[in-house]
Amino acid sequence: MQLRIARFLAQTRVEGPGERACIWVQGCPIRCAGCAVPWTWPEDGGQAISVEDLARRVLDGPPVEGVTFAGGEPFAQAGPLAQLAALLRAEGLSVLTYSGYTLETLRRGARADWNALLSATDLLVDGPFLAARTGGAAGLAGSSNQRLHFLTPRYAHLREELQFDPQRIEVRLGADGEILVNGVVSPDALEAMLDGLACVEPSSRGRR
Ligand code: SF4
């Protein structure tokens, strides 16, 4: 099975608990106003990679405790992501999945691929990015409507910490001067931070 991805990061500390690999999928039908990553919207952008190759990139990379699926919209590619999650969970990794859909919508959809990805997810961060609700957003949420759902006991002990931690980002400077940002930050805060810097497609997420 193939996936389309916008970006892969082998190790990060700001995309969920501990050190994690992060996969930003390509394609999002939700298209929130104010989305910080509109280049992830087209379904035919990014790059195609097989589930097996992506699993190998995660498992052969630096040590991580889990993987985060961000986007784009992970549930737009729920089938292959569920397969990838199963391969990684078999190796003991945890799975954090973002979605612009609410958990209620995903459950009401009663789709086999959505249910498979939900079943393979330890921690779900749900809901669309709402630009008017960035104030008060904390932790892994880009806007305050987004909720954390602990779908397995794996991270239940971090419930308070993950809900109320400050938002965090990482900034990487490439050899060619490219600045890459990931983590959770509001578009306004990101713009202010990068003001005056030459920035090429920062991979931050307004909602995430
Ligand atoms: S914030 Fe997320 S769900 Fe909303 S349009 Fe952007 S990628 Fe899609």
Image (tube, helix red, strand yellow):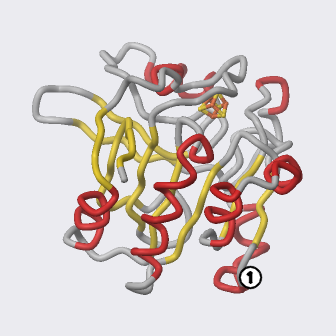
Left or right of 105, for residue 157: left
Using the rendered view, name the quadrant where residue 64 is placed.
Answer: bottom left
Residue 55 in which image quadrant: bottom left
Q: Residue 2: percent from the left, percent from the top?
A: 35, 47
Residue 30 left/right relative to 67: right
Q: How many marks?
A: 1
Could you tell me which residue is drawn at 62 percent across and 69 percent down?
121
As drawn, 187 above or below 109? above
Q: Is mark 1 within 8 Å of ligand 1?
A: no
Q: Residues within 10 Å of mark 1 (few under 14, many from 20)?
A: some
Regarding ligand 1, which quadrant of the image does it lie in? Answer: top right
Q: Amino acid at mark 1?
A: Ala
Point 63% across, 24% down: residue: 35
Q: Is residue 33 left or right of residue 78?
A: right
Which element is circle 1 on?
helix
Is the C terminus in the top left, top right, bottom left or bottom right quadrant?
top right
Q: Position of residue 84 (x, y in %)?
A: 42, 64
Residue 119 place in picture, x, y as percent = 67, 71
The residue wearing badge 1 is 156
Front residue of 194/87: it is 87
Residue at 52 percent across and 76 percent down: it is 94
Q: Nearer the viewer, residue 166 or 53?
A: 53
